[in-house]
Image: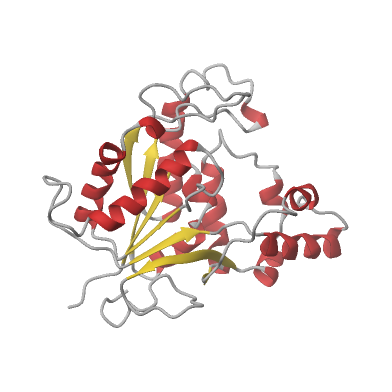
Amino acid sequence: MAERLRLMAVHAHPDDESSKGAGTMARYVAEGAEVMVVTCTGGERGDVLNPGLKDAPDLKRDIAEYRRHEMAAAVAALGVRHRWLGFVDSGLPEGDPLPPLPHGCFARTPLDVASAPLVKLVRSFRPHVITTYDENGGYPHPDHIMCHKISVEAFDAAGDPERYPGTGAPWQPLKLYYDRGFSRRKLTSIHEAMLALRGESPFAEWLKRWEDRPEPEVTTQVHVADYFRQRDEALLAHATQIDPKGWFFMIPHELQREVWPWEDFQLVRSLVPAPTPEDDLFAGLRTRVEV
């Protein structure tokens, strides 16, 4: 019997998996694929972003523990497997000049040290497809950029028996994607639909800021309209990070289903024939591996 398809999504912090590609993961789980989320850090230096929880006295002190529980709830909502890499959140430094990153944080860890546990996971889980962020991290958070680096390193190294000895038998993933969850084209489409529906949109200022931003390449659109509910449940599980009254939940599912029922990705590496555009991260693999 052919083996099952396997997808690994590598993310920087707890909650990233629920705001980037969650519908895609829920869809593939429902179809019978094995899906694993890898979270590089514990989000220890994250702020409480939900206004309704700002005054909770112990949240900041125990933020890492709260986020572990939130992550478990999000995993349950999506039906995925989950592993922590165990690195410490680097925080998002502010100032001019920028202060140095904290000693011992994820983004300051040498690449081979940071990549080794991910290589070990790739070799044990044996994903056919890996998703991660682009070289800018999707946005320039140091942990997102480091997540990109170790994901590319693991994709390239996991199949080489000479590299990372002691981390398991070699396994070569076949396709590597960058998440392209937010593009000007997507935001414009939803923005115009919201104006037509309600006369207002949460994206007006956002689009002004993005006027000169290069449009990311999208090669692959996965239809996920049937999994918006699971995506939203996973997002809401991260209660310290997500405002349930925020912009994300202002957009009716019916509008999203009509205007943009997809999650977007860019295929950046493929070791199997995979003509683009695609509508499936497993395109080119389904003849050799069952769902």
Left or right of 116? Residue 141 is right
Give the image location of residue 274, x and y in percent: 39, 78
In the image, 150 versus 242, the foreground residue is: 150
Which residue is located at x 67 percent, y 30 percent?
Answer: 51
Which residue is located at x 69 percent, y 43 percent?
Answer: 246
Q: Quadrant of residue 236?
A: top right
Which residue is located at x 43 percent, y 62 percent?
Answer: 177
Q: Is residue 84 above or below residue 271?
A: above
Q: Residue furthest front?
A: 97
Q: Quadrant of residue 284?
A: bottom left
Which residue is located at x 60 percent, y 23 percent?
Answer: 97
Q: Quadrant of the N terminus?
A: bottom left
In the image, 224 versus 126, the foreground residue is: 126
Residue 111 visible, this orientation = yes
Left or right of 250? Residue 118 is left
Q: Is residue 14 above or below residue 251?
A: above
Q: Residue furthest bottom?
A: 287
Give the image location of residue 276, x and y in percent: 48, 78
Give the image location of residue 241, x and y in percent: 57, 36
Residue 13 visible, this orientation = no
Give the image location of residue 226, x and y in percent: 55, 68
Q: How many marks?
A: 0
